Amino acid sequence: QVQLVESGGGLVQAGGSLRLSCAASGRTFSTYNMGWFRQAPGKEREFVAAIRWSGGSTYYTGSVKGRFTISRDNAKNTVYLQMNSLKPEDTAVYYCAATADFSAYWYVTSTYDYWGQGTQVTVSS
């Protein structure tokens, strides 16, 4: 069982930065692959970024490549999402998620077994 708690969301102007954190409970965090997803009002939840348990591989959706960076600190049971050059279209509730094995489907919501409650990110123009 893994419990996830996101933090770090807020209101920022376009071009600004935020760093989201996701703190995980449980001693097996280092064995889980982690993902960040987001959901804007009236839209489906979409993949943002993912990182393998070792931190050796990362994956991003095209719209955030070069702007967002996912990382993890297994000693702190925490995964991060550094978001730079934010745009109004990045406005959404951001969720972190965990799975023991995502194989090649890191971008699919049903791959993940555990989810946080979400943190709101609002980017003003």
Image (cartoon, rainbow, N blue to C red):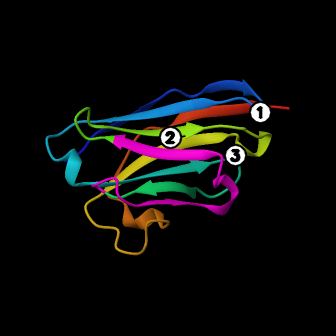
In the image, residue 47 lies at what x, y percent? 55, 58
Q: Residues within 10 Å of mark 2 (few under 14, many from 20)?
A: many
Label 1 crowd bin: few (<14), some (14–19), many (20+), radius 10 Å:
some
Q: Which residue, given by chain and number where applicable, does mark 2 sit on? A: 81
Q: Which residues are magenta?
A: 53-72
Measure the alpha-carbon separation of dots 1 and 3. 21 Å
Left/right placement of residue 116 relative to residue 69 reads left
Disc 1 marks which residue? Answer: 15
Position of residue 62 in the picture relative to residue 1 (left or right): right
- Residue 4 is tagged as none
- Magenta segment includes 6: no
70 magenta-colored: yes
Q: Nearer the viewer, residue 116 or 99?
A: 99
Seen as rendered, the residue at the extreme bottom is: 104
- Residue placed most toward the observer, 31 or 89: 31
**Which residue lies at the image location 43% right of the left edge and 72% below the top edge?**
105
Mark 2 residue element: strand
State which mark lies toward you, 2 or 3: 2
Q: Earlier in the sequence, mark 2 or mark 1?
A: 1
Image coordinates of residue 119 in percent, x first then y, are: 53, 33
Residue type highlighted by circle 2: Leu
Task: Give the number of the disc on residue 41.
Answer: 3
Question: Which circle's residue, 2 or 3, is located before the other in the chain?
Answer: 3
